[in-house]
Image: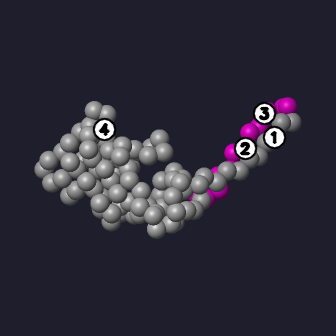
């Protein structure tokens, strides 16, 4: 099983070729290819390469499928006996990508 661990948007994702995932918003058009160069780990069969902090020369290529938004979350703040209430909503922007190739040099 070939996989890699990639860092993007302050988060880490375990990716394999052909897998679709939603990451923090990327500045790319639908259908455009993006390259993730912060690869923290690559595993191909029995061989595993761990980066310090990244694996040098390793990249992961992905194709942008959609630009979308996550479901709404509600943030409610309240102070007891003070009459203070505040309701706030938030929807995060996401980019859905499909992993096309894992390159390990």
Residue 17 drawn above or below residue 104: below
Q: Please tell me which residue is depicted at 42% across the width and 57% down the height of the picture.
A: 34
- Residue 63 visible within the image: yes
Tell me if 51 is positioned left or right of 47 in this view: right
Q: Looking at the image, which residue is at 14% across and 47% down?
A: 47
Q: Quadrant of residue 76?
A: top right
The disc label shown at residue 85, or none: 1
C-alpha distance separating marks 1 and 4:
45 Å
- Measured as percent of width and height from the top left, residue 37 is found at 35, 46
Indicate which disc residue 79 carries: 3
Q: Dot 1: few (<14), some (14–19), or many (≥20) neighbours within 10 Å? A: few
Q: CA distance from mark 2 to mark 3?
A: 10 Å
Proximity of marks 1 and 2: CB atoms separated by less than 8 Å: yes
Mark sitting earlier along the chain (1/4): 4
10 Å neighbourhood of mark 2: few (<14), some, or many (≥20)? few
At x 36%, y 61%, the residue is 99
Image x and y of residue 84, in percent: 83, 36
Residues in magenta? 70-82
Q: Earlier in the sequence, mark 4 or mark 2?
A: 4
The residues tagged by marks 1 and 2 sit, at their Cα atoms, a distance apart of: 7 Å
- Residue labelled with disc 2: 76
Q: Judging from the image, what secondary structure is the residue with disc 1 in? A: strand
Q: Is residue 67 magenta?
A: no
Image quadrant where one finds the N terminus = bottom left
Q: Quadrant of residue 38?
A: top left
Marks 3 and 2: in contact by CB < 8 Å? no
For the residues labelled 1 and 3, the Cα–Cα distance comes to 7 Å
């Amino acid at each position: 099983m070939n996989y890699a661990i990639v860092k993007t948007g302050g988060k880490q994702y375990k990716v394999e070729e052909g897998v679709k995932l939603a990451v923090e918003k990327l500045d790319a058009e639908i259908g455009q290819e993006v390259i993730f160069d912060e690869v923290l780990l690559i595993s191909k069969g029995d061989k595993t390469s761990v980066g310090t902090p990244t694996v040098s020369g390793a990249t992961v290529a992905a194709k942008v499928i959609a630009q979308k938004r996550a479901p709404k979350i509600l943030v409610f703040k309240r102070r007891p006996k003070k009459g203070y209430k505040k309701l706030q909503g938030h929807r995060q922007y996401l980019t859905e990508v499909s992993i096309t190739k894992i390159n390990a040099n």
